Amino acid sequence: MMGYRRLETLLDVAHQGFYVKLTCGCGHVRRLDPHKLIARLTRRGANTRLDRLNETIKCGRCGGKSFQATHCDGPLKWSR
C-alpha cells in the first residue's frame, strides 16, 4: 500500500521530485525549481512553507501577493 505524504514545505516538494507552481489572482502562473527557491529564501531568512510563500514572494506580472502555491510535475514532464 502506498502512503500519502502531505507536501507542506519547499523541501518536501523537492524531496518528492516536484516543482513549485505559483498561481496568482491576476492569472499569471509560474513554475519554479524548489531547490533554487530554497537557496534564495533561506539566505534571507524567509519561511519556506508553501502556505507562507506569499509573505516573501511577489507576482512577476502584477506585483501582488495573492497567489496559491502548490506542487506540479517538473520540466521533464512538461514537454510530454
Image (spheres, helix red, strand yellow):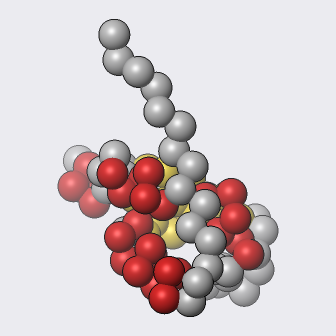
Left or right, residue 38 beside residue 48: left
Residue 78 image offset from top left, x and y in percent: 30, 54
* Residue 26 visible in the snapshot: no
Residue 52 image offset from top left, x and y in percent: 70, 65
Up-down relation of residue 22 to residue 45 (above or below): above
Nearest the viewer among 38 and 79 is: 38
Residue 38 image offset from top left, x and y in percent: 44, 74
Instruction: Give the farthest residue toward the top.
Output: 1
Q: Residue at x 61, y 58 (%)?
A: 50
Residue 32 image offset from top left, x and y in percent: 43, 69
Left or right, residue 14 beside residue 4: left
Left or right, residue 70 beside residue 18: right
Q: Residue at x 73, y 75 (%)?
A: 55
Q: Residue at x 57, y 49 (%)?
A: 8
Image mark count = 0
Nearest the viewer among 29 and 45 is: 45
Instruction: Give the farthest residue toward the front.
Output: 45
Up-down relation of residue 4 to residue 74 (above or below): above
Instruction: Give the farthest residue toward the bottom.
Output: 44
Q: Quadrant of residue 29?
A: bottom right
* Residue 6 visible in the snapshot: yes
Q: Residue at x 42, y 53 (%)?
A: 13
Q: Quadrant of residue 67?
A: bottom right
Nearest the viewer among 46 and 54 is: 46
Left or right, residue 75 beside residue 51: left
Q: Quadrant of the N terminus?
A: top left
